[in-house]
Image (cartoon, coloured by chain):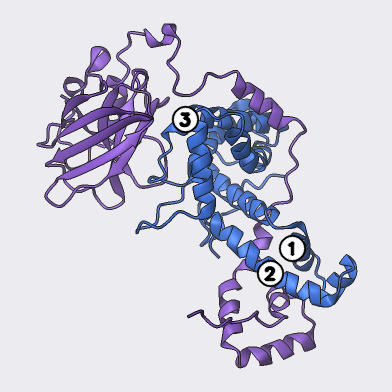
Amino acid sequence: MAEPDPGLPHLDLGGYLLGTLDASEREAFERHLGGCPGCRRELEELRGTPRLLEQATEPVQVPAGLEARVLEAIAREPRPGLARPPARASRSRPGWRSPWALGAAAVLAVAFLVGLGLGRALPGGGGQPAPAGRTIQLVAAGGSGASGVATVRPERNGQIIELAVRNLPPPAAGHFYTCWLVADDDTLQHQDRVSVGSFTTSPDGTATVRWETAADLGRHPHLGVTLEPDNGSPLHQGPKVLAAA
Amino acid sequence: MQVLAAPRPRGLPVLGRRPRPAAPAPPAALDAEEAALLARVGRGDRDRALPELYRRYERRLFGLGIRLLGDAGLAEELVQETFLRVWRTAGRFDPHRGTPSAFILSIARRLAIDLWRRPSSRPLPAAPESAGAIDETIDHLLLQLTVREALDSLPPPQREVLELSYHGDLTQTEVASRLGIPLGTVKSRAYHALRAFRRALDQRGIDG
């Protein structure tokens, strides 16, 4: 059965909130409020809204042609996800050893990262890629007993990634784990990685998760797991916890 | 022009760093729309999704640049660099980790701080130096700009009644006379405009 239409509130509710009633209108409205729960509820919901009008900046005037200039600059960029030009792709710098190590070093206090054996655990420049249709064994980046297995299978629009982890304690409050696909030249300052997805673990330290991703494995061939603060930032900030064995 | 020392009003949200709610909730319609646009940009759609997303943020980003840096050239640089990075990194956006606006504004926030640190871009010698002070200033500016954006999203007749009523120190009878519309229209428009403004603020994560 349909709810009865509560009807519109008193016609002067908006003016009352905005302070545009004259004295007699205001008194009349306040008398009405005493006997009208609907108006009192509306008043409560909207009470803080007019003061936000004060917060608004003056309208922003944008220079003519800015949109066209920005879109032209982007038109000169390669499409995201396309393979980089050979000159960049063939760099031999072991790109993802140092950024991960730096990330972990910044958060040594995290309880279950008991060491910094990242260099050993990581593939370095000639490391373990995550090719399609492969199973990847993951080990604790910090020497704890955590481990995992990721399988990467191609599908029509990308890949299906399934990840099962063991002995990975549930993240501390305000944190979660993130699975990444990482490019060779990723650094903390200039991150080049794709978040596959985020997860937490059960109290027994296990989790099984499945994601679909359109990430380009040619560009982001390395798979790993980090612990990230839940602060809305899309960037990698926390320590690495699992890396390819 | 400078509002560098302005404190962020208490109880108002920090934009671009909005935390996720404790319990999963369906994304707001605006977030869902922008998440879909970001996903399309991540797949290389620069003809339709990119311009649409750009238009939703252009004024906020330019406004942040001009107010923080006091220079139209630097403000343009902020807008252009932010969107170049959005273009390059949209594929990394993960809706489970934050909202589209948090993704875009956190890029803008970092770039704005970098531009601010350029020696040539400091408009005031006595401006705050600490990262915390600049962060606060950017939060406050983004809040003000997002409120403006919420206001600008209303139909012009509703926005007009709100702006005249609140900033004009007019009674509703005077507003009616100023706009040449019946008093009853002003009254109902004022209520509906407040409701619509509240909804636009909610969609942008602004409580109050």
Q: Are marks 2 and 3 in contact (CB under 8 Å)?
A: no
What's the amino acid at mark 3? Thr
Residue at numbered disc 2: B192
Name the N-terminal-most of marks 2 and 1: 1
Residue B130 in sight: no
User: Are marks 3 and 1 in one subunit?
Assistant: yes
Q: Residue at x 19, y 43 (%)?
A: A208
Where is residue A64, by image quadrant? top right
Residue at (21%, 30%) from the top-left corner?
A: A151
Under tag 2, what secondary structure? helix
Q: Compare residues B2 and A28 and report the one nearer the observer.
A: A28
Chain that appears blue: B
Q: Helix or strand or loop: what does disc 3 sit on?
A: helix
Horizontal side of residue A199 vs B118, given as left or right = left
Q: What residue is shown with label 1?
A: B158
Q: Earlier in the sequence, mark 3 or mark 1?
A: 3
* Crowding at mark 3 (Cα within 10 Å: few <14, some 14-19, many 20+): many
Image spot of residue A188 (x, y percent): 37, 27
Q: What's the residue at 18%, 26% (across, down)? A: A136
Q: CA distance from mark 2 to mark 1?
A: 8 Å
Q: Which mark identifies residue B89?
A: 3
Most distant residue in the left direction: A145
Residue occupying image coordinates x 69% and y 66%: B193
Badge 2 vs badge 1, beta-carbon distance below 8 Å = yes
Q: Chain of mark 2?
A: B
Chain letter matching colour purple? A
Amino acid at circle 2: His
Q: What separation in Å lies between label 3 and label 1 (alpha carbons)?
A: 37 Å
Query: Which quarter of the rendering shows the C terminus of chain B?
Result: bottom right
